[in-house]
Amino acid sequence: MTWDGRPVRVGAVATPGLTIRLDPAGGGGQVAVDRVLVAVDVTQDREVVTRLMAVEALAGLVLLALVSALAAGVVHRGLAPVRALAAAARSVADRVPGARLPVDQPDLETHELAVALQDALRRRTEAEDRVRAFVQDASHELRTPLTIVHGWADLYLQGGLDGDRLDRAMVRVEAETTRMRHLVDQMALLARLDEDVPLRRDPVDLAAVVQEVADDLLVVAPDADVQVDTVPAPVIGDRERLLQVVHNLVGNAVRHTPPGTAVRVLVRPADGVVLLDVVDDGPGIHAELRDRVFDRFARGDAAGSGSGLGLAVVRAVVAAHHGGVELLAADTGTHVRVTLPAA
C-alpha cells in the first residue's frame, strides 16, 4: 500500500469504522478509508500448479499404457485356448485326418465350449451322413423302376411288342411309375417334415380315421383279416397325415404277413394321451432289423416291393404331432404303438 507515493505498512484494520492505522516509513498515523484492496503475487504458485498438472497427466498416461498392455496380455493369454479350439474345429470341419477337438481344457468355461462345439460338429457330420445315405438309397430305389420302364420302352421302339405283350408292358409301366410317384411323394413329405413345415392343427377323432382305413382295406385287400377295436379319441392334428400314419402301419402289417393273418387295430385314450396299437400275429421282425425299423430305407430280406420309407414317414409325422412311436416286445408277431397328445 502506498501513501503519498511512499510505501505504507498496514498494521491493523479496525472495524466497523474501517479506520486504518498507517505507519509510513515508521511515522504512524490514522486515516479513514472506504475499502481496502489487498493483492498477492501468485505467479509462482501458478507455475507450480501447472507443473504438478503436467506431471500428473504424464503419470496417468504412463499408468494407462501399462494397464492397457497388461490387460491385452491377460486377454491374449486367456483367449489362447479359444484360438486353439477354433483351429482344431476348422481342421475337423475340413476332415483333416486325425484332427480332433481338445476337450480336456483347464478352465470350466473353455471345457464347456469345447464339448458344445464337439457336439455341434458331430451333429453336423451325422446330418451329412444321413443326407448322403438318403440320396444313395433314393437313387438305388429309383434306379430299378426307371430301368424297368426304360426296358419296356426300348423293347417297344424296337418293334418287339404287339398285342397282349403290349398290354402287359403298359401294365408294368403303369405299376412302376406308380411306385416311383409313391416313393417321390414320401421323400418329399420327409423333406418337408425335416424342415419343420407346420402341419394343420384341427380336431381329429383318431377312431374315425382308423375306421376309414379299415373300410378302404375292404376294397383293396378284401381277404385281409383286420379287426378294429376303438373308442372316440380326439386329438389335435393334420387328418390327412394321421390317415397316412394308420395306412402305413396297417398296410405294412397286411403286406408283410401271410394271407389270413389277424391284424388288430386298437385306439383308446389313457392319461392325457391317445394310444394307437397295431398288432399282428405274423412272423415278426428280424432281430437285426428291430433297432432300425423306423429308419429310412430300412428293409428286411422279405420286405417285398415296399419303399422302406413307410415306417420312417410314420415316425416323422408322429413326431411333428409331438407324439412318439415304438416297437413293443411281443411273444409272436409285431406290436407297434403310437402315442399322441389327447385334445
Image (cartoon, grey):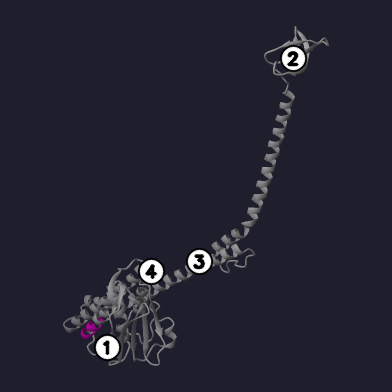
Of pointers 2 and 1, the one earlier in the residue sequence: 2
Looking at the rendered structure, the secondary structure element under dot 1 is strand
Tell me which secondary structure the magenta stretch mostly adopts: helix
Q: Amino acid at mark 1?
A: Val
Residue identified by numbered label 2: 20
Of pointers 1 and 3, the one earlier in the residue sequence: 3
Give neighbour class at mark 1: few <14, some 14-19, many 20+ (Cα, 10 Å). Answer: many
Disc 1/disc 4 C-alpha distance (Å)? 32 Å
With 205 as the anchor, is 111 left or right in this view?
Answer: right
Q: Residue at x 45, y 71 (%)?
A: 129
Q: Nearer the viewer, residue 265 or 157?
A: 265
Q: Nearer the viewer, residue 168 or 255?
A: 255
Where residue 286 sits: x, y (%)?
Answer: 41, 88
Cβ–Cβ below 8 Å for labels 3 and 4?
no
Mark 1, mark 3: which one is toward the viewer? Answer: 1
Which residues are drawn in magenta? 213-219
